Image (cartoon, rainbow, N blue to C red):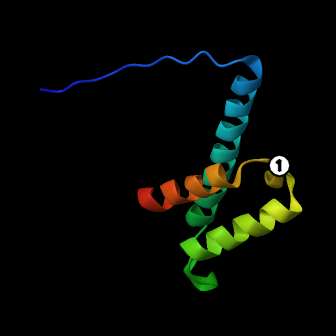
Amino acid sequence: MFVSHRYRSYPTVEQASGCRGHCADTRYVKNLALEQFNLYDPRRGPTPSSVERFRQLAEARRETWLGEGSSAVQQQALRDFDRAL
């Protein structure tokens, strides 16, 4: 026997805007990681490791607009990408 619950949220305008921002950050970080993975060229060496991707994210957060978003959301995007590989 399975029990399931369905919930519906009704975010305010500000909360909905924040959620869209988190989704955009997640999409951007995952797409960058995927681009690195797809551009693999054996002559240039292996693709960045998980540790290297996290280091690159930290650097990008210091130098670009990514620093305005949630680091937890962006780091989770990289963890999800690693799990998908």
Amino acid type indicated by mark 1: Glu
The picture places residue 47, in percent across and down from the top left corner, at 57, 74
The image shows residue 13, relative to residue 37, as above or below, that is above
Report which quarter residue 11 is drawn in: top right
For the residue pair 11 and 54, the one nearer the viewer reads as: 11
User: At 64% across and 68% down in the image, what residue appears?
Assistant: 54
Quarter holding the N terminus is: top left
User: At 70% across and 45% down in the image, what residue appears?
Assistant: 25
User: At 79% across and 69% down in the image, what residue appears?
Assistant: 59
- Density class for disc 1 (Cα within 10 Å; few <14, some 14-19, many ≥20) is few
Report which quarter residue 3 is drawn in: top left
- Could you tell me how many numbered marks the image carries? 1
The picture places residue 7, in percent across and down from the top left corner, at 44, 19
Report which quarter residue 39 is drawn in: bottom right
For the residue pair 13 and 42, the one nearer the viewer reads as: 13
The picture places residue 69, in percent across and down from the top left corner, at 76, 47
User: At 61% across and 60% down in the image, what residue appears?
Assistant: 33
Outermost left residue = 1
Residue 48 seen anywhere in this rendered image of the structure: no
The residue that mark 1 highlights is 68
Residue 68 lies left or right of residue 30; in this view the side is right
Residue 17 lies left or right of residue 54; in this view the side is right
For the residue pair 2 and 20, the one nearer the viewer reads as: 2
Instruction: Identify the element where label 1 is drawn.
Output: helix
Quarter holding the C terminus is: bottom left
Residue 66 seen anywhere in this rendered image of the structure: yes
